[in-house]
């Protein structure tokens, strides 16, 4: 590869951030657009189908935190080795991350498949239709969950090398495949079978699978920021453990966040399927408004990583400040629209009067906290880029499980459903404020990731 390609240690920082953030954000928006289309199609099957996909999605995201750990660990190491101009070791780490993601996914699929019903009942899902739809959806996704793990890991590797455009283009293709297959497989249009909720799951796997094949081809053909063409195709357990040590806390951060979501569902389950459907719709909208924040945060991480790898601490700190201002401004602005016009956005997904009424109240509480969520996203990723994945995990645990779930259980007991919405909102405020306070201590600047020695990409591993 061209050694200057994707170099984030020189040049205008704002330009680097925007060149990364814009395609990443567009990719997230595109993926979310598919999720919206998917929910619209599934929504035509009724509230039970919406609730089933919503609950199953939360359970699957809990499983996917393992992929988050692998992709985060790989991204940190690849970015810092590239910043240190050690391209051979960056490619070596990338290969180990890909192998680790594949084997991990296979194991999770084998373990998780027979536990689908247990997971649904564990969050107090009581409607028989929701349980049946949810089992079908989850088991299909679990069979092909390696596509999710590999997609996240490969995208993180490309972004670590300063290339956010290629993953975006591949995601466009994957999303188009999803959108085309969704109505065909859900409703049985043309000569396709009518599969209902299962059709949505199959469409997702096919779209992801095509994307993974393309990204792997680019890596092995030498057309990616790192080249795997001459890298030994064998597992190195020591290097894999290094990736996991960095990423495990990021996985736990995602685990606590998604476990708290399941805890919220556990509290909401007895309120009935309309409340669960309203919560599901609002969480989709929350993800939509967070897309710019995700884009900017994931742009900050490789910039911080490469510059710390090059020992340019001041430049890394400046990139975080810029990212924080961008993320907070954009997310708070979009959140204002949700605050003023909640019913309009809820109606996109459901025409049920009760779902609209319940969802509008929650969305207004949630929209007030989007600025704090931006703080949490951007500063958390900046800390990750520096190699500090432990502190964001602890902050997430305290805010989401301690403050969030604790308040949701307590307030729901005393003031009912509105107490759930207040508890969730306060957890977002606490998490954003705590992340800012920890970042301000500056301890992330002293973390060392780069090894003095490195392995040849063609070194034989026994």
Image (spheres, helix red, strand yellow):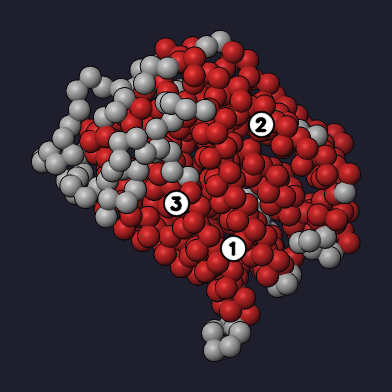
Q: Is residue 301 left or right of residue 275?
A: left
Point out which mark residue 166 bears.
3
**Mark 1 or mark 2, earlier in chain:** 1
Q: Residue at point 87% right, 54% down?
A: 343
Task: Examine the rendering and report whether any part of residue 383 can be seen.
Answer: yes
Q: Quadrant of the N terminus?
A: top left
> Badge 1 is on which residue?
134
- Mark 2: secondary structure: helix
Disc number placed over residue 326 in the picture, else none: 2
Direction from residue 385 to residue 433 in the image, left or right: right
The residue sitting at 75% across, 29% down in the picture is 426
Disc 3, disc 2: CB below 8 Å? no
Image position of 443 with respect to 341: above or below:
above
Q: Position of residue 290 (x, y in %)?
A: 66, 42
Q: Residue at x 38, y 42 (%)?
A: 157
Q: Could you give the CA–CA distance between mark 3 and mark 2, rounded to whole angstroms? A: 23 Å
Which of label 1 and label 2 is nearer to you? Answer: 2
Q: Is residue 395 visible?
A: no
Question: Element under label 3?
Answer: helix
Crowd tier of the residue under label 2, counting other residues whose Cα lies within 10 Å: few below 14, some 14–19, many 20 or above: some
Question: Residue 354, image x and y in percent?
Answer: 87, 59
Residue 315 is tagged as none
Q: Earlier in the sequence, mark 1 or mark 3?
A: 1
Q: Residue furthest bottom?
A: 191
Q: Secondary structure at mark 1?
A: helix
């Amino acid at each position: 590869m061209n050694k200057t390609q994707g170099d984030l240690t020189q040049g205008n920082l704002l330009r680097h951030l925007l060149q990364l953030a814009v395609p990443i954000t567009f990719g997230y928006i595109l993926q979310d657009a598919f999720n919206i289309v998917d929910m619209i199609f599934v929504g035509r099957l009724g509230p039970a189908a919406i609730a089933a996909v919503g609950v199953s999605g939360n359970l699957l995201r809990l499983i996917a935190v393992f992929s988050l750990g692998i992709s985060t660990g790989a991204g940190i190491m690849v970015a810092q080795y590239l910043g240190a101009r050690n391209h051979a070791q960056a490619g070596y780490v990338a290969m180990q991350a890909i192998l680790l993601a594949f084997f991990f996914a296979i194991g999770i699929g084998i373990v998780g498949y027979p536990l689908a019903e247990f997971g649904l009942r564990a969050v107090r899902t009581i409607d028989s239709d929701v349980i049946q739809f949810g089992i079908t959806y989850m088991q299909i996704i679990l069979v092909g969950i390696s596509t999710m793990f590999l997609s996240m890991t490969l995208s993180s590797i490309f972004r670590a090398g300063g290339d956010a455009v290629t993953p975006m283009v591949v995601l466009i293709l994957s999303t188009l495949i999803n959108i085309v297959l969704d109505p065909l497989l859900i409703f049985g249009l043309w000569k396709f079978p009518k599969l209902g909720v299962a059709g949505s799951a199959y469409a997702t796997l096919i779209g992801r699978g095509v994307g993974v094949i393309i990204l792997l081809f680019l890596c092995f053909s030498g057309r990616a920021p790192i080249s795997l063409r001459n890298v030994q195709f064998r597992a190195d357990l020591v290097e894999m453990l290094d990736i996991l040590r960095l990423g495990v806390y990021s996985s736990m951060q995602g685990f606590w966040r998604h476990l708290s979501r399941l805890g919220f569902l556990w509290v909401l389950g007895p309120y009935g399927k309309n409340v669960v459907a309203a919560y599901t719709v609002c969480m989709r909208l929350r993800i939509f408004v967070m897309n710019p924040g995700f884009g900017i945060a994931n742009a900050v991480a490789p910039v911080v990583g490469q510059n710390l790898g090059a020992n340019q601490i001041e430049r890394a700190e400046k990139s975080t400040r810029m990212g924080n201002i961008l993320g907070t401004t954009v997310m708070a602005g979009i959140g204002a629209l949700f605050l003023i016009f909640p019913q309009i956005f809820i109606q996109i997904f459901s025409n049920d009067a009760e779902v609209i009424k319940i969802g509008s109240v929650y969305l207004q509480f949630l929209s007030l906290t989007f600025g704090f969520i931006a703080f949490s996203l951007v500063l958390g990723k900046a800390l990750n880029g520096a190699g500090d994945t432990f502190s964001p995990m602890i902050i997430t645990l305290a805010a989401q499980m301690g403050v969030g779930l604790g308040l949701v259980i307590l307030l729901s007991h005393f003031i009912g459903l509105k107490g759930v919405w207040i508890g969730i909102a306060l957890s977002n405020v606490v998490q954003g404020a705590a992340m800012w306070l920890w970042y301000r201590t500056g301890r992330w600047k002293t973390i060392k990731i780069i090894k003095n020695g490195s392995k040849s990409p063609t070194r034989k591993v026994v």
